[in-house]
């Protein structure tokens, strides 16, 4: 492995990845830390140790390295004026490299909490540190640096699930495909793994996880180790999509003690969007994952904590503070709650759909899915913006993309800029008044049959991938008996709550519910889970931020 050299990552420069701090900047940092000597060969951070501080080199030199089999690979070298660290310092995740002194010298040592205070108060240093942390994490991901190895076929549903989970949680890993990598048998023998065990995740160099659940992956990697569950939070946010992350950012930046509980990964449904082009401030567009990643970092910059891969199972709503019940019998207590648990795409009513989920049928269109569509024919089902974004994105690599909708046009459901993009694309074909009637294939999707229900015409095509993005079902079932919902299960809030809803919920206050407040005082609903929501990322972000203003009022009551 070559030493990491600052190279041209999107929007970055060498000086941004490994900037050299001036003497004046170092003096400002020292006010938040302490000076110390460093001896030759001294180890500062061990691989898989939870990092609690960063180091600014005043004199001497530090080496960042990882073990690869029996050898050491140098990842980077920090000389005078440079500093260690990347995003795991904010997230509390384990170190991906070890750090030791290769020259004796002097350091400035800064604890995590002190660093967080620094980046909240010093705009210049905040930009330097956070930019470097983000670029370094992108480099680590691009190079698969760390001690996580995934062994599994690219055609496996579970391999795809694990890759998607690691990718969306910004966890570097290396992937070995037994169908393509000739040296896979040596790796299998070393860890006593059979082909039938795959996919397998080798965690922390020695722990073998056979087809692990997301929760098992999180536990092994220590994602949640630094999260304090013991005290009553000012605000617990359920869901880390755009609405939930907005609530976390605004809540934490305004001094609230905030915890976010996320069942999968930051971004929610929007995190699966390949490119959002109508979000304010991004004229060239931004992917859902990029937007979520930035918001995720921003929330932690202000002190919000996130629990990853934990499912909300219920809310003890008969007393305050409220108790949020998680899987594993865990409880989180909160003075206020923002429900941002989102919605899921409806599934096509096809007999053998489950057979092809992850093996040709997908519910997101990220780079992971797109890379499997090169030169192939694919189908996108749905007429909303997510479907349009997916079709345009996939069409860059696919031979042909069919968009199937039940309506007679896209005009009422999709933004005009996407409709025009679709109309002008030579390899996208729109089929209106059309529905899927069957899927076929052995182990993987091979063909799709559809019918035009106005003409009755049936067509069958060889199709390698189908992206289903139809309708939405709210993730509100875990709140049964606590909050008023409409007939479709979306949560009613504010002025949409009728007097009978409040009577049934035994609303205890003399005031009416605030905007976005549910029939349960101090519990708010935002984003796709809320009745009457506008299905746009900007709207979700706005709702999350607005909810926080009312949280302050509730906490002051």
Image (spheres, rainbow, N blue to C red):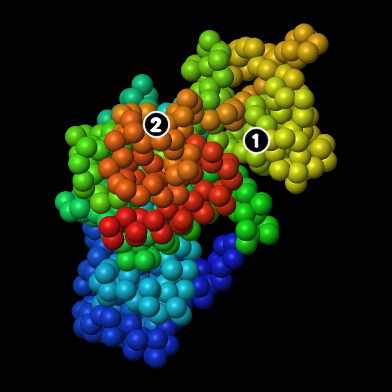
Q: Quadrant of residue 25?
A: bottom left
The residue carrying mark 1 is: 384
Q: Residues within 10 Å of mark 1 (few under 14, many from 20)?
A: many
Q: Is residue 488 above or below residue 92?
A: above
- Asked if labels 1 and 2 touch by Cβ distance under 8 angstroms, the answer is no
Q: Label 2 to label 1, Cα distance in Å?
A: 34 Å
Which quadrant of the rendered structure holds the N terminus?
Answer: bottom left
Residue at the image point whose x is 49% and y is 16% from the top: 355
Residue at the image point whose x is 20% and y is 53% from the top: 232
- Residue 175 lies, in percent from the top left, at 44, 40
Q: Nearer the viewer, residue 400 or 156?
A: 400
Question: Horizontal placement of 155 versus 499: left or right?
Answer: right
The residue carrying mark 2 is: 500
Residue at the image point whose x is 36% and y is 66% from the top: 254
Q: Secondary structure at mark 2?
A: helix
Q: Residue furthest left?
A: 230
- Residue 528 lies, in percent from the top left, at 50, 39
Q: Residues within 10 Å of mark 2 (few under 14, many from 20)?
A: few
Image mark count: 2
Whether residue 375 is visible:
no
């Amino acid at each position: 492995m070559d030493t990491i050299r600052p190279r041209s990552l999107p929007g970055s420069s060498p000086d941004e990845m490994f900037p050299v701090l001036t003497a004046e900047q170092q003096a400002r940092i020292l006010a938040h830390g302490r000076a110390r000597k460093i001896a030759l060969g001294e180890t500062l951070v061990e691989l898989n140790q939870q990092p609690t501080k960063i180091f600014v080199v005043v004199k001497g030199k530090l080496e960042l390295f990882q073990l690869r089999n029996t050898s050491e690979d140098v990842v980077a070298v920090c000389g005078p004026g440079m500093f260690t660290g990347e995003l795991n310092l904010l997230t509390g995740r384990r170190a991906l490299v070890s750090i030791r002194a290769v020259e004796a010298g002097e350091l400035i040592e800064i604890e995590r909490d002190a660093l967080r205070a620094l980046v909240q108060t010093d705009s210049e240093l905040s930009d330097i540190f956070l930019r470097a942390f983000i670029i370094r994490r992108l480099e680590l991901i691009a190079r698969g640096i760390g001690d996580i190895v995934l062994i599994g076929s690219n055609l496996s549903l579970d391999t795809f699930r694990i890759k998607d989970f690691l990718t969306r949680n910004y966890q570097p890993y290396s992937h070995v495909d037994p169908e393509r990598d000739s040296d896979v048998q040596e790796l299998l023998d070393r860890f006593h793994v059979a082909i039938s065990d795959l996919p397998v995740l080798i965690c922390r160099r020695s722990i073998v996880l056979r087809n692990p659940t997301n929760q098992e992956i999180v536990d092994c990697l220590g994602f949640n180790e630094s999260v304090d569950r013991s005290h009553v939070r000012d605000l617990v946010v359920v869901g880390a999509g755009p609405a939930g992350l907005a609530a976390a950012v605004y809540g934490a930046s305004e001094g609230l003690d905030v915890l976010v509980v996320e069942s999968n990964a930051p971004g929610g449904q929007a995190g699966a969007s390949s490119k959002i082009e109508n979000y304010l401030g991004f004229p060239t567009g931004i992917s859902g994952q990029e937007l979520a990643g930035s918001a995720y970092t921003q929330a932690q910059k202000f002190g919000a904590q996130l629990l990853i891969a934990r499912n909300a199972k219920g809310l003890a709503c008969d007393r305050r503070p409220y108790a949020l019940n998680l899987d594993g019998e865990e409880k989180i207590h909160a003075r206020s709650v923002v429900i941002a648990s989102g919605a899921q795409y409806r599934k096509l009513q096809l007999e053998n759909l489950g057979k092809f989920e992850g093996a040709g049928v997908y519910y997101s269109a990220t780079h992971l899915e797109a890379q499997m569509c090169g030169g192939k024919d694919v189908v996108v089902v749905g007429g909303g913006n997510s479907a349009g974004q997916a079709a345009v994105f996939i069409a860059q690599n696919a031979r042909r993309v069919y968009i199937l909708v039940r309506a007679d046009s896209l005009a009422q459901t999709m933004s005009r800029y996407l409709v025009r993009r679709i109309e002008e694309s030579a390899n996208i074909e729109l089929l209106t008044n059309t529905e899927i009637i069957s899927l076929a294939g052995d182990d993987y999707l091979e063909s799709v049959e559809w019918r035009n229900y106005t003409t009755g015409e049936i067509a069958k095509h060889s199709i390698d991938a189908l992206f289903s993005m139809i309708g939405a079902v709210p993730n509100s079932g875990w709140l049964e008996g606590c909050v008023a919902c409409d007939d479709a299960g979306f949560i009613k809030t504010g002025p949409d709550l009728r007097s009978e809803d409040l009577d049934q919920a035994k609303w205890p206050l003399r005031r009416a519910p605030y905007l976005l407040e549910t029939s349960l005082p101090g519990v708010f609903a935002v984003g796709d889970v809320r009745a009457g929501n506008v299905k746009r990322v900007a709207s979700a972000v706005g709702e999350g931020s607005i909810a926080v203003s009312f949280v302050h009022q509730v906490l002051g009551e």
